[in-house]
Amino acid sequence: MAVELFNDGKHIVHAFYDLVDDSPGGAVQCNQFLIVDNGHGALIDPGGNMTYSGLLMDMQKYFSSKDLDYILASHPDPDIIASVNKWFVASHCKVMISSLWTRFVPHFTTGKDVSHRIVGIPDQGSVIRLGQSNVLALPAHFMHAEGNFQFYDPVAKILFTGDLGASLVPQALAASAVTDFHSHVGYMEGFHKRYIVSRKVCRFWANMVRQLEIEQIVPQHGSRFVGRRAVEDFISWVESLECGVDLMTQGNYQIPR
């Protein structure tokens, strides 16, 4: 079931939190997002084959899949874009992804030439026209992929952060907004220390996003942050995070015995 994040009658944002069975031994929980503006639509990080059927059926209530303009992919992981071939068949959409990854996308397809439907986002990001609004592709390289983008919706004032902000919460809690930031850190910390490359890029990211008017930060895994206080708490936490190569020592690089 979709969760409405924003709706002013012409511009609508929905999130889908319950399309993955995250039972023990199963797949990691992940979220999918739909932005609709004046009859045009984009899916952000639509997921793999296990999310495709549920997302396809659920989104019809708000927007016809055949009219989909874009799939916006933060990076090329299977839980982000493995279903892309099915979306190519179901719609006329184009995929927008980092220029580093455009030649990897066809590995999720049947081998037919789909190069005309794959659009590379340059490292500096881009402005994507959707209906009568824009979506900004913001550089988020090494958070966690080498070529990585986040997507900012200036109408809804929502920043979709991909794996940044991911929390490993029970699926029943994923659709809820974070109410106690400090207790929520425990769900995020281990993931970020391993999957985000360094504090240096965290500081660059914080400097960039503080220039935006953000009401919600919405990751691709787990719960979202709603309200200016929660958004600033999260940005400050990321800014001070030691992670990735900051934590590596020679002890992590030894010959197994």
Image (cartoon, grey):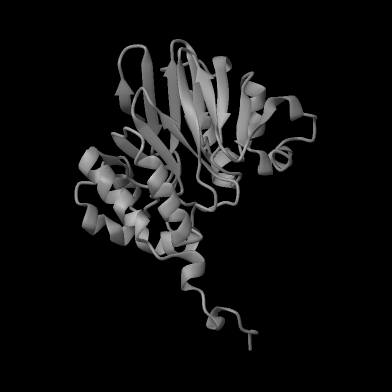
Q: In front: 36, or 22?
A: 36
Q: Quadrant of the N terminus?
A: top left
For this view, does 88 lie left or right of residue 250? right
Residue 79 image position (x, y, % from top left):
54, 45
Is 232 placed left or right of 51 in the picture? Answer: left
Residue at horizontal 40 percent and vertical 65 percent from the top: 242
Q: Which of these two is toward me, 81 or 240? A: 240
- Note whether 22 is above or below 73 in the view shown: below
Q: Is residue 128 above or below residue 44?
A: above
* Residue occupying image coordinates x 43% and y 32%: 152
Residue at 34% across, 29% down: 157
Q: Position of residue 192 (x, y in %)?
A: 42, 59
In the depicted structure, whether residue 11 falls above or below residue 227: above
Query: Quick check: 255 left or right of 42?
Result: right
| Residue drawn at the location 61% of the way across and 31% of the way down | 96
> Taking 91 as reference, is 99 above or below it?
below
Kindly tell me whether residue 114 is visible in this rendering.
no
Whether residue 122 is visible: yes
Give the number of marks. Answer: 0
The single residue placed furthest to the bottom in the displayed view is 257
Q: How far across and down, in percent of the image, does residue 34 sit?
A: 45, 27
- Of the 4 image quadrants, the one containing the C terminus is bottom right
Q: Position of residue 141 (x, y in %)?
A: 54, 48
Res 174 → quadrant: top left
